[in-house]
Amino acid sequence: MARKTGSHSEITGPRIRAEAARLFSRHGFAAVSMRAIARAVGVQAGALYLYTPDKESLLFDLLKTHMDELLAAWEAEPRAEDPAARLECFVRFHIRFNLERAEAVFLSYMELRNLSPENFARIESLRKRYEDALEAILRQGQAAGVFAVPDTKLATMAIIAMLTGVNTWFREGGRLSRDRVEAIYWDMVRKSVAP
Amino acid sequence: MARKTGSHSEITGPRIRAEAARLFSRHGFAAVSMRAIARAVGVQAGALYLYTPDKESLLFDLLKTHMDELLAAWEAEPRAEDPAARLECFVRFHIRFNLERAEAVFLSYMELRNLSPENFARIESLRKRYEDALEAILRQGQAAGVFAVPDTKLATMAIIAMLTGVNTWFREGGRLSRDRVEAIYWDMVRKSVAP
């Protein structure tokens, strides 16, 4: 059956997603019912099923949208040719993008286990594409002799974990600005891959 | 009322904790009932309440035990005086300990939000003690001129996030041994704090 189009779905879609993201990140996926999401949106539970077949599809939709936006935003960054400049760009981009999407990042890490195996594999392949983008920079720098990394795969995982960790402690208006945090992390990453 | 002592509580305590940890990490805290834990242990739900007043106390018990064991194990490590040797010891210890307790580490990151505010604060203060142990090493090396870290607090958070990330991808019997992974991470950490 064709899904309803027009103003109804256009207005409620983003609101459903926003309320679902807020409730999932506050209480956890398992503790949130479709009824609770409908209540938060201000529609009947039945109306929710016009938008999504089930709760897991809604979660997958949130996680996939986050990864699609991350990949598109990285592709849209100005492309430095120099590996060190490109690595600096990646470090600053990752911290900035993730701090701006704190809720989506939190969900992406916390609720992966609640995806079906097929949907989990789809998210994993998008993550892999993002990791590959960083690994390509490390390989390029390695080939040019400006980086010395014993294992580009491990360095990729180490750098991404380090950068994503900022989300767990950063508070806007705290001791350090985002820009200062980016600069400090770049200093550590730059040295960690240096010859 | 005094809690029952003797063989009953001694035998079921560890089993209750092990089954709770397994179920929480597989399905999430919110999705697991006291009844389900009792069933997995093979006792009546009522017997569970002889051991713990409620599900949140059981979760707190698991998270606190993990932090207590982590801190005790770190204290028991041989104490190198040289800051670089001590940092290497910390890096290898953290990776090794966390890989050995993968389930407890996973729970500690996933289920923090399900603690009461007081219990959350107690876990946070134990985490802070562990972070302080690493920061003390960085300060010591900084003072001795062997490390150059723009901000010891941020370097602490960056290093811990990087090392803990190993748990998300490491597979026993995979491409690299634990020892090789430790050596590669130590190489990156060593350089990241170098002058």
Image (tube, coloured by chain):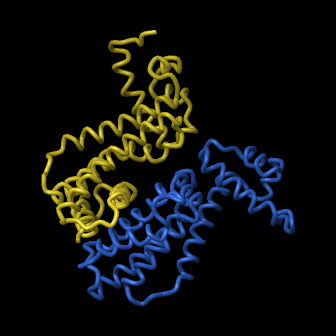
Chain colours: A blue, B yellow
Task: Determine if residue A80 is in view.
Answer: yes
In this view, the residue in front, A2 or A80, is: A80
Q: Is residue A105 left or right of residue B18?
A: right
Q: Is residue B107 left or right of residue B101?
A: right
- Report the label total: 0
Instruction: Tell me which residue sits at (24%, 59%) in the image.
Output: B182
A62 w.r.t. B16: above or below: below
Q: Is residue B84 left or right of residue A77?
A: left
Quadrant position of residue A185: bottom left
A193 w.r.t. B132: above or below: below
Instruction: Tell me which residue sits at (33%, 57%) in the image.
Output: B156
Horizontal and vertical percent position of residue B154: 37, 60
Quadrant position of residue A10: bottom right
Q: Quadrant of the N terminus of chain A?
A: bottom right
**Residue most toward the top?**
B1
B55 w.r.t. B166: above or below: above
Quadrant position of residue B33: top right
In this view, the residue in front, B129 or B48, is: B129
Task: Determine if residue A1 is in view.
Answer: no
Q: Quadrant of the C terminus of chain A?
A: bottom left
Horizontal and vertical percent position of residue B3: 42, 13
Instruction: Tell me which residue sits at (62%, 59%) in the image.
Output: A60
B185 w.r.t. A38: above or below: below
Horizontal and vertical percent position of residue A179: 48, 71
Horizontal and vertical percent position of residue B23: 48, 37
Instruction: Tell me which residue sits at (41%, 72%) in the image.
Output: A183
